Amino acid sequence: MASTILLMYSHGVSIAYAVLGIIGQRPSYGYDLKKDYDLYYGKQKPLAFGQVYATLSRLLRDKKIATQGAIEPSKGPERRLYAITELGRNDLETWLTTPEEQRPDTQTVLFTKVVTAILLEKEPDVYLDAQRGAHIQRMRELTTLRRESDSLSERLTADYALFHLEADLRWMDVTLGRLKPLAKEIRRER
């Protein structure tokens, strides 16, 4: 595949399913899997070799992949060719066709920082203002990437990240307007 797919948020996709997807297109060696993962998914956060082999071990254990052919000796570690099994293909298809649920913990870090600031008698609006500045700076970077990129996948991924940052900014605005009642509620529960 010529285009590079960027993932801004590694938690947005399971590494195991990404690896299954790569192996699902053709059997692959661990080194080639890492290279393909970094090309398709991990441009901003490449996958560590240890993560590749840990993922392969779990997929082998769960019988979602199998080694194919003889183990090839090389100057370094042995080379194993991995292929997806029918169980792995079925699991991958199920994952692909199952809509993602809205996760209630999407704002966990931001919300946790606000509540912690209140508990410590700090001003959470100071934290939220700093976070707003960081989000706006990241939005500028993503807007530049989107404008200058020749890759449609990079532009779409930048759009995805921008929309999430915009949602965070809206949440911050709503939260700023509700800080006093929130602080009152938290102090009442102590």
Image (tube, rainbow, N blue to C red):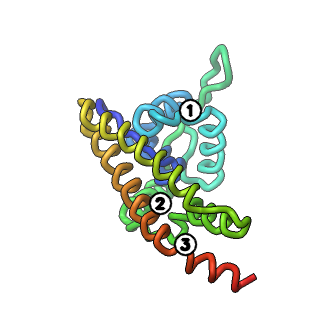
Q: Which amino acid does label 3 sit on?
A: Leu
Residue closest to the eye, 81 or 103: 103
Residue closest to the eye, 106 or 73: 106
Any part of residue 89 in sight:
yes
Residue 92 against residue 148 in the figure, above or below? below
Q: Label 2 to label 3, Cα distance in Å?
A: 44 Å
* Residue 60: percent from left, percent from top: 62, 48
In which quadrant is the N terminus drawn? top left
Residue corresponding to mark 2: 91
In which quadrant is the C terminus drawn? bottom right
User: Is 167 left or right of 109, judged from the image as shown?
Assistant: left
Furthest residue toward right: 190
Of the image marks 1 and 3, the number of the one nearer the N terminus = 1
Q: Which of marks 2 and 3 is in front?
A: 3
Tag shown at residue 112: none
Tag shown at residue 30: 1
Residue corresponding to mark 3: 179
Q: Residue at x 52, y 64 (%)?
A: 107
* Residue 87: percent from left, percent from top: 50, 58
User: Is 22 left or right of 187, judged from the image as shown?
Assistant: left
Disc 2 packing (10 Å; few <14; some 14–19; many ≥20): some
Q: What residue type is labelled 1?
A: Gly
Residue closest to the eye, 111 or 186: 186
Any part of residue 13 in sight:
no
Of the image marks 2 and 3, the number of the one nearer the N terminus = 2
The secondary structure type at the circle numbered 2 is: helix
Residue 97 against residue 41 in the figure, above or below? below
Q: Which residue is drawn at 63% across and 83% down?
A: 185
Q: Which amino acid does label 2 sit on?
A: Asp
User: Is 78 left or right of 22, judged from the image as shown?
Assistant: right
Question: Pointers 1 and 3 in contact (CB under 8 A)?
Answer: no
